[in-house]
Image (cartoon, helix red, strand yellow):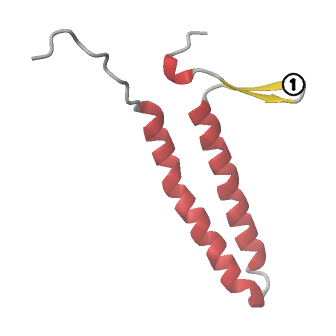
Amino acid sequence: MDQTPTDNPLTLKLGGEELVIRRRYEVLSIINDFFIALWFLGGSILFLYPSLEKAAIWLFIIGSFQFLIRPTIRLVSHMHVKRIPASNWEH
């Protein structure tokens, strides 16, 4: 598989094991989606109890905010700032 410099695997040492994360932005997006699902599921369950309605609303607000993060992750995954090496042709 052809790897670009922006897709270098991230390796974390965990005791005698290594966790290798490839396609970091995609993994980050999946984790974000997982949390969105948890916030909305939690909010839906809390709405079953009238005394917890305010907490349910806050979970929906958090989940909705994370929906804004999703396109941000996708956009950042397509854009990378790269330092241009110094040139001998400077004026």
Along the line of sight, the residue nearer the viewer: 86 or 6: 86
Choose top left, top right, bottom left or bottom right for residue 36: bottom right
Choose top left, top right, bottom left or bottom right for residue 46: bottom right
Along the line of sight, the residue nearer the viewer: 43 or 75: 75
Outermost residue to the bottom: 51
Q: How dense is the environment of label 1, judged by Cα within 10 Å: few (below 14), some, or many (20 and up)?
A: few
Query: Which residue shows up at 48% across the image and 34% down it?
Result: 77
Q: Disc 1 designates what residue?
A: 17
Relative to residue 52, is residue 11 depicted above or below?
A: above
Quadrant for the C terminus in the image: top left
Relative to residue 71, is residue 49 depicted above or below?
A: below
Q: Position of residue 64 (x, y in %)?
A: 55, 64
Q: Position of residue 35 (x, y in %)?
A: 68, 55
Outermost residue to the left: 91
Along the line of sight, the residue nearer the viewer: 45 or 18: 18
Relative to residue 17, is residue 59 depicted above or below?
A: below
Choose top left, top right, bottom left or bottom right for residue 41: bottom right
Left or right, 17 with respect to 21, comes to: right
- Give the amino acid type for the residue marked by disc 1 in the picture: Glu
**Tag 1, which secondary structure?**
strand
Left or right, 58 with respect to 80, comes to: right
Relative to residue 29, is residue 51 depicted above or below?
A: below
Left or right, 80 with respect to 53, comes to: left
Q: Position of residue 57 (x, y in %)?
A: 63, 78
Query: Which residue shows up at 56% across the image and 10% down it?
Result: 2
Quadrant for the N terminus in the image: top right
Query: Which residue shows up at 60% across the image and 42% down it?
Result: 29
Q: Position of residue 44 (x, y in %)?
A: 72, 72
